[in-house]
Amino acid sequence: MDRQNHRAIWRWLSGIFAAPLDAEALAACRANVRFAAELSQDPALVDGRRMMQGALDALPDGAEATRILERSYFLLFSGAGGPATAAPYESVFTPRGGRLFGESEARMRTLLRHLGLHVAAGPGEPADHVAIECAVMAELPAGAPLRADLTRHLDGWLPDFRDACGEFDASRFYAGAAMIAAALARQELADTPLQ
């Protein structure tokens, strides 16, 4: 799969992890999971795509589907699930047992500043949210040193994030998305020349 396809998948994942899906976003996601199937002849991405597709197929039609995914999102990512939470922030995973607003958050803020960007969600939102990191990967050109650096960081924490989502996501939708993100980071890392 070429890097343009990678960028499209990173953008898609960013939208999935950014906020609960509304009805329009859910409909687009259902279409995009099928689109991703065509994109990903890569066996590393297939399991995550299948998990997401299975989760979407199991959802009822209409507003109930968005309510189910919204509940899953908040339980999994907001801390509402108590210990059964997968924090969507790199600084929680690196170093192991880390805390919010750690070194990785400062690094992401610096990277965003360098790119002329900033976190607009509010004064307390950490910059190392998985959706933000995926969005930056979608925008950085292939071969850019900043992309290679972010890829190494993603590969360092997304496997643990994937495992947490796999353990705690009752919907299996976000667990599948996390599988795709971790596999994509690993694939990009393998394709990145050593610097």
Image: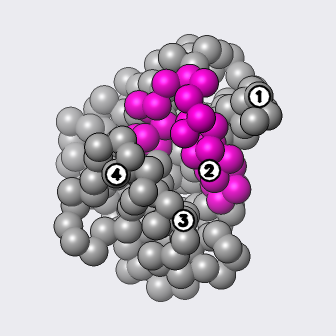
For label 2, count other residues whose C-alpha is less than 10 Å away and answer few (under 14), some (14-19) or many (20+).
many
Q: Which residue is mark 2?
A: 154
Number of other residues with Cα within 10 Å of mark 1, as a class: few under 14, some 14 to 19, many 20 or more: few
Residue 85 colored magenta?
A: no
Q: Is residue 55 above or below residue 90?
A: above
Name the residue beneath numbered marker 4: 113
As helix, strand or loop, the secondary structure at mark 1 comes to: loop
Q: CA distance from mark 3 to mark 1?
A: 23 Å
Mark 2 or 4: in front is: 4
In the image shown, does 188 or 38 lie closer to the viewer? 188
Marker disc for residue 148:
none
Q: Going by the image, does 47 lie left or right of 111? A: right
* Res 126 → quadrant: bottom left
Question: Label 1 amino acid?
Answer: Pro
If you read the primary sequence from the N terminus, does the residue marked by circle 2 or circle 1 appear first?
2
Residue extent of the magenta highlight = 134-159
Q: Is residue 124 above or below residue 129?
A: below
Q: Residues within 10 Å of mark 3 (few under 14, many from 20)?
A: many
Q: Which residue is mark 3?
A: 104
SS at badge 3:
helix
Q: Earlier in the sequence, mark 4 or mark 1?
A: 4
Name which of mark 3 and mark 1 comes first in the sequence: 3
